[in-house]
Image (tube, rainbow, N blue to C red):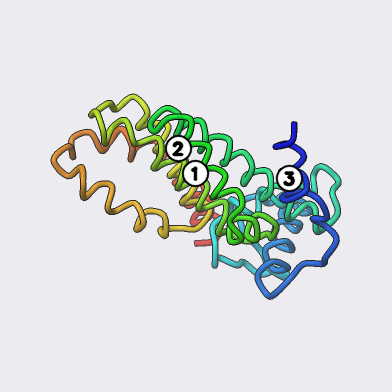
Amino acid sequence: FLILIAAWVVYFRGLDAVGLLGPDEPRYAFIGRAMQATGDWITPKLWGEPWFEKPALLYWMVGFGHQLGLNNELAARLPIAIVAVLFLAAYHRLLCEHLGRDAAMYSTAILGTCAGWIGYARIAVTDLPMSACLGLSLLLTLEWLDHGDTRRLPRAGIWMGLAVLAKGLVPVVLAVPLFAMQWKQWRQWWRFAVPAMVVALPWYVACSVANG
């Protein structure tokens, strides 16, 4: 119960107390609101013009917030805060499996109280959605790394696909060391790569078809 109260205070309280900040947060929030208003969930548009600086995941999250009737700040920030807290829960659970309860508890407490994590959890930019999806993807490969167990690789690939939808090829580059360590098992890579492409490619294809 105390953890829930702390999570509410740290991650959710006062999310709309301050207006949208900097150049990026208002831009992303506007694009997400425009998607919801126009019904065009494929092409990101800023002031009516296509804007391809980032993929669509964050814009979809913001648009869904507006679909729920939230104000501009909450529609943009609440989905990010929810992702941050849900990732902490998944992080704790997966670390419990691999490192034990004590290590999981301390690691989750460190991440959950990290100023960077809290700060990015309270603004509508792509960094935290990408980090959460990439982090979960890599955590789901631990059994493959430790024991050669490939059963979780498809789920890891799904989260990698979502990370790509959050920030393009950045998570792919960050995942290169994983495959460098597992280069001898290259025949198993498809279990990860195919689900990632199934998740990420449809939007890229649809956006290319719509915009050339």
Q: Position of residue 151 (x, y in %)?
A: 33, 24
Q: Position of residue 57 (x, y in %)?
A: 59, 50
* Among numbered discs 3 and 2, the one appearing first in the sequence: 3
Q: Is residue 51 toward the left or the right of residue 5 in the image?
A: left
Residue 132, relative to residue 157: is it above or below? below
Q: Which mark is residue 107?
A: 1
* Among numbered discs 3 and 1, the one appearing first in the sequence: 3
- Asked whether disc 3 touches disc 1, contact meaning CB atoms under 8 Å apart, the reply is no
Residue 101, relative to residue 166: is it above or below? above
Residue closest to the eye, 167 or 92:
92
Secondary structure under tag 1 reads helix
- Asked whether disc 2 touches disc 1, contact meaning CB atoms under 8 Å apart, the reply is yes
Residue named by callout 3 = 64
**Quadrant location of residue 152?**
top left
Q: Position of residue 84 (x, y in %)?
A: 62, 46
Cα separation between marks 3 and 1 = 31 Å
Residue 74, relative to residue 151: is it above or below? below
Residue furthest out toward the front: 102
**Quadrant location of residue 43?**
bottom right
Residue named by callout 2 = 103
- The amino acid type of the residue labelled 1 equals Ser
Image point (68%, 75%), residue name? 23
- The amino acid type of the residue labelled 2 equals Ala
Q: Is residue 11 toward the left or the right of residue 55 in the image?
A: right
Cα separation between marks 3 and 2 = 36 Å
**Quadrant location of residue 30?**
bottom right
Q: Nearer the viewer, mark 3 or mark 2?
A: 2
